[in-house]
Amino acid sequence: MIRFAKPLLLSLLFLCLPSVSGALLYIDINAPGGKLMPVALPDFVVASGDASLARGFPEAIGGDLGMTSLFDVLPRQAHLERIVPEHFGGRPLSFPDWKMIGAEAVVIGKVEFRGDLMTVEMRLYDATLGNMMVGKKYAGPVRQFRKMAHKFANEVLYAFTGVRGIFDTEIAFSARPEKGRGKEIYIIGLDGQELRQVTDNRSFNLFPRWSPDAAGLAYTSYRTGVPQIYLRNLATGKERLLPQVGNSKSPGSFSPSGDFLYATLSVKGNSDIYRMSLTGSAVQKVAGGWGIEVSPSVSPDGKSVAFVSNRSGSPQIYVKEIDSSDERRVSQAGNYSTSPSWSPAGDRIAFTSLSGGRYSIYTVRPDGSDQRLAVSGSGDCVDPSFSPDGRYLVYTLRKNGYSELKIGSVDGRWQRGLFKGLPAVGSPSWSPRQ
Amino acid sequence: MEPLFRRMIAFSLVFHFAAFGIGLLWAALHAPPPRFLEVAVVDLVGGEAFAPPPRETAKVDEQPAPPPPAPETPAKEKKAPKEPAAPPPVTAKAEKKSTPKEVPDEKALAESIRKMRQKRASTEKVGEAVGTIRREKAARSAIRQIGERASRKIDLSAARPASGGMAGAAGSARVPPEHLAYFRQLDEKIRSNWTVPALAVGEKEALMVQLRIVIEKDGRVSQVRMEKTSGNPYFDDSVRRAINKASPLPVPPEQLRGGEDHYEIGFRFYEDGGAS
Amino acid sequence: MKNMLVGKRVLVALSVVLLAVAAGCGKKEMVKSTDGAPGAEMSTPSSAETQAGGQITSETLGTQTAMAEAQAGVAATMEKPSEFQDIHFDFDQSFIREDARPTLREVADYLKANPAASILIEGHCDERGTAEYNIALGERRAESTKSYLVSLGVKAGALSTVSFGEEKPLDPGHDEAAWAKNRRAHFVRK
């Protein structure tokens, strides 16, 4: 029997050995879709001065981050740690406290006044790794606080995604002033704040279009009784009257260099696309025909222009290579497509199209393929204008004479109302980055 | 009673082989996707034969016996810790079970296996067996401490599309259910804490980060070692954040740790380009 | 003795086999990271309405334009009375309709009788469609009217045109009746 002992013992040993696999294991993890990064925006430290800034800054930043569909701003009631001036003098944040409420990012800020000058220091911390990702100091008048907040929100976005934000850009538009029958040009911030009036001549002021350096606006004004195109320097208020060619005229878009303005001019009742030199006085027809050609929108590389033409019998969107005679139709379905806006990202053209009795906004590739619905609502959605990063559209929502401006992401994931404080708002135009 | 004894042996032999054969047959019919050869990895740990080979794609064919590319290591029959893997073959020829399509075996390993098998075949002393086992264990932890990379990687997850991705084809390994449960816990905890900054990832990019971590007895992550970065720093950062946020991780079960105070495991984080 | 040796070996082998078989058979499972369908979990867009503060800071950035200009500009926004009727157009069209001819003859007669007189033809559209296209359409209507009058013998120099697109509707309503009234050419004695 002893002979059997050995093998039996062996077998027993076998049984006793831990079944640990010395193998190297890799677990595959697929990225979960649609998750938002939780970010905490505690009250800013305000040493003196306007106490409302303590909330004003975080709210402005939160409003911006909310646009991206990437961030989830945690409610401030959940915050465990209070931010104090010492946090800017070397005291570290209590990261476990922030981690405990689930925050992955924390933005803290401190506001100081020296007379009229306000300085704001803002910091972005990665709460899970426990390090400061971005720290900036801004100085300026207190009424610029939103601009500072927007700039920092751009930094936060960049830190996590490498993408430049557009939160400090603005929208120009026309609307009827409270008293009067005409329309004036206004500018408003993305957050619907800081509304400013640009024109005040109580006539029709329409179709504001930004210059590439965001320093000026071209627009049509009837202030002399007939429409003319004016170029206004926003900082100085100085204006310049462009060559008075033709009867009706409206600016379309600037060339990327800012040397030309592509505009609609109508000569003898026939509207065509012209290129007007801003450094000289040359005016040159770019696209046209016996039909109506209007609304040029230049591609970001300056080589092509999208416009409307009704040469086929109904208004449709066409694209023309500027230095050749190649023209092609790009709007597909429907029998009324107007108001093209070429994305600064170059990949798509947005436009208004009538379909099913209602106007909606579509986008299409410059080669005419992949036409997609971008925005539609319970009224007419018209006159889209792309954000500088090509991710958002501003447009007018019209319903029974009521109108408001709205902004939304091109993919439809996010939208919000921008402005409805004046009647007859319309013709919005998104500024370039400053 | 010699003749009787002989008959007994014979009968027992026949019975055992029959039973074995039936078992084989049944398993072959019911076996779902093929398995991995973690057993081979275990052998790998055994000292002198260890050599970290580069890829896991080379097919191994060290068995004189026919079809399946890699034989379930017969070496396991005596030494290997109990892996609920394929029934180890009694002899060199009897073991062909279903084998995985992806065979993370390399020639060096094959050689070592054969050598070891041969060696073992010639020894039957318990003492020697135990000694070898002890050495293997020591070698294993030594390797872990050095952080050296072993040749074989076991995917517990469904196959990645790399090889055309039939679910079972490349992905399955025989792992005890309680271990699987732990791996799933890890997976869930980390995944639920992972936020990918969508804007940072291009529309058509497919990104992957591969890393190994060491989990202490209390679930704390004491080491993160990046093995492959995705090339997109924002994506890499999001992965680091995910692990930090998920820490402390579920405590690794004693069995997995094998008596150590820590447990090392790897992850591959994938972002499917164009998945949105 | 040889038999015993053989037998022992066989027993060892068999017992090992048995043990392995016992331990080995089990359902193989795979750890899969659940592939959340990327599209399905999108959070629904939250539309937080932000109202403008309504504070219009009337900072005209810069110099005001001349008063004279302002008058003409304001005037442009007013509906000017006319001794002539408006003529109307079909939706998205600028051709002269039959029902427009009587009025046009009247205008032509007046101008031919008063060679020093001049008339401004305003082209208008209804509110449908988009603003820039409507400026062009209004322009066409005004021009088309002018051509017709010229064909009736009026001197081109006596006629000027301006388009207001959809900016100056006659009837603020939002139905076909209002729209039909707004698609018009309007004659203003200069």
Image: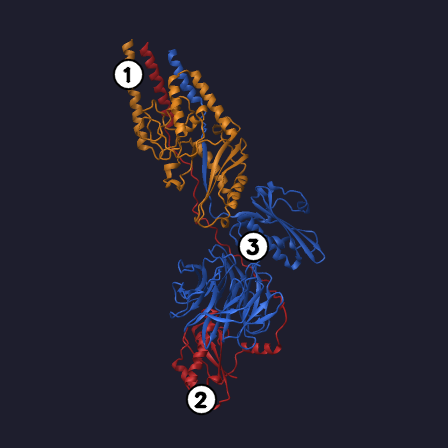
Say which quarter of the image contains residue B49. Answer: top left
Chain that the image shows in orange: B
Chain ID, mark 2: C
- Label 1 to label 3, Cα distance in Å? 83 Å
Q: Nearer the viewer, residue B182 or A297?
A: A297
Chain that the image shows in blue: A
Chain ID, mark 1: B
| Image spot of residue B65 (x, y percent) | 31, 26
Query: Which label is found at residue B10?
Result: 1
How many marks the image carries: the answer is 3
Kindly check if marks 2 and 1 are in contact, taking CB atoms under 8 A apart as contact: no
- Label 2 to label 1, Cα distance in Å? 131 Å
Q: Secondary structure at mark 3?
A: helix
Closer to the observer: label 2 or label 1? 2
Q: Secondary structure at mark 1?
A: helix
Chain that the image shows in red: C
| Residue with the most extreme bottom position | C113
Co-location on one chain, circles 2 and 1: no
Query: Label 2 neighbourhood size at 10 Å, few (<14), some (14-19), many (20+)?
Result: some
Q: Which residue is mark 3?
A: A64
Check disc 3 and give the amino acid type. Answer: Asp
